[in-house]
Image (cartoon, helix red, strand yellow):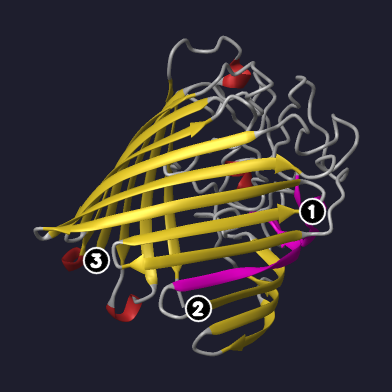
Amino acid sequence: NILSSDLGATDPLTQQHNRYEISLFDLEDPDNKNDIDRLEELYLKYNNNKLSITLGKQLINTPFINPQDSRMRPTEVEGIFAEGKAGQRWTLEGGWIYNVSPRSTVEWYSVANSIGINAQGVTPDGVPADYRDNLTSKGIGLSGISYKPSDKFVIKAYNQYADNLFNTALVQAEYQQPLNHSRFKAAIQYIRQDVVNNGGNEDPSKTYFDRRNKVNVFGGRLGWQKGNWETTVNYTRIGKTGRYTMPREWGTEPFFTYLSRERNEGLGDVHAFMASLKGLLPHYHLKLEIAYGHYYLPGADNAVLNKYGLPSYRHVKALADYEFHGMLKGLDLAMLWVYKGHLGSRPTDLKYVFNKVDMSMVNLIMNFHF
């Protein structure tokens, strides 16, 4: 910390915290800018050319639990996790997680107590959710399989079982066709979520996953790659029968339409469209990305399908990432600009606007990799 504003202060009109800046240091204690250390990785690992098994505190990267982007403290987990290959075409992974240290925190929590550190939103009945420290769960079971019958085609399946909370299953198929000095790509995705037992608590105001929730998510992607450049068009549909619900403390969502600095978690009845262009300029050691999306959501005051009161929005992302070489090898400097504007009628209640729409954000991010 060189110079920063009061991250714990609230907006005088909406009485809300800044949902972006507050997570830069310690989400649990915004005034803490010194003691932000934690033991991140401590594990035993067995490894050979076909199998690795890791036991202890570790980083994993799965569709639903992952380090997340551009914060000083990534999401870490504690448990056992294995990755392996069966022949040339099959890849397997899975494990059991019993503790989590969410992004932007300095403590370790049980799986149940890791949920609710971020905003809790409202229940489908419209009352403030109160599930933090009121959930019970033994842990998270993860399993994934990938089958690649040819160089052009791959099928992936993944399941996340959150004991006493919910189950999420994902199936994804990806295809690519070489063309004249280029490559055509396509992918489809389906996600299903169901409650497990009572969703964490018998009390509806203190449960995490509502028992009425039946979630179906569909996604599609078309893309074209030539050399170091790739462009895609993407679509996500979250059905009307429930809110896609996944702890924000655990990772970002695997939707094709995901863009940095916003999520569609906690929403149902969503139509999302996004187009992106990514490129690499090796001579200049530079990575570039530009993306634009429209996200059509239920009304911000529709508690049944809108957990956090987010209005429909358009989203622009521009990223430039420079990688140093020579004596400074390992250092990279990134500039991220995000704009979010409202779609349709602008909400009159400012709590649906503040740090949600009609806003710009600039991040200058320096990382050193070693």
Q: Earlier in the sequence, mark 1 or mark 2?
A: 2
Q: Earlier in the sequence, mark 3 or mark 2?
A: 2
Q: x, y (%) of residue 155?
A: 44, 59
In the depicted structure, whether residue 341 falls above or below residue 225: above
Of 336 and 156, nearer the camera is: 156
Q: Estimate how packed mark 3 is, as few (under 14), some (14 to 19) or many (20 or more) residues with alpha carbons within 10 Å.
A: few
Residue that badge 2 annotates: 85
Q: x, y (%) of residue 85?
A: 50, 78
Instruction: Report how far apart the C-alphas of labels 1 and 2 lie in the structure.
Output: 27 Å
Magenta part of the chain: 90-115
Residue that badge 1 annotates: 163
Residue with the most extreme left position: 180
Q: Estimate how packed mark 2 is, as few (under 14), some (14 to 19) or many (20 or more) residues with alpha carbons within 10 Å.
A: some
Residue at 28% over, 75% down: 325
Q: Can the viewer see residue 37?
A: no
Q: Nearer the viewer, mark 3 or mark 1?
A: 1
Q: Can the viewer see residue 49?
A: yes
Q: Are marks 1 and 2 in contact (CB under 8 Å)?
A: no
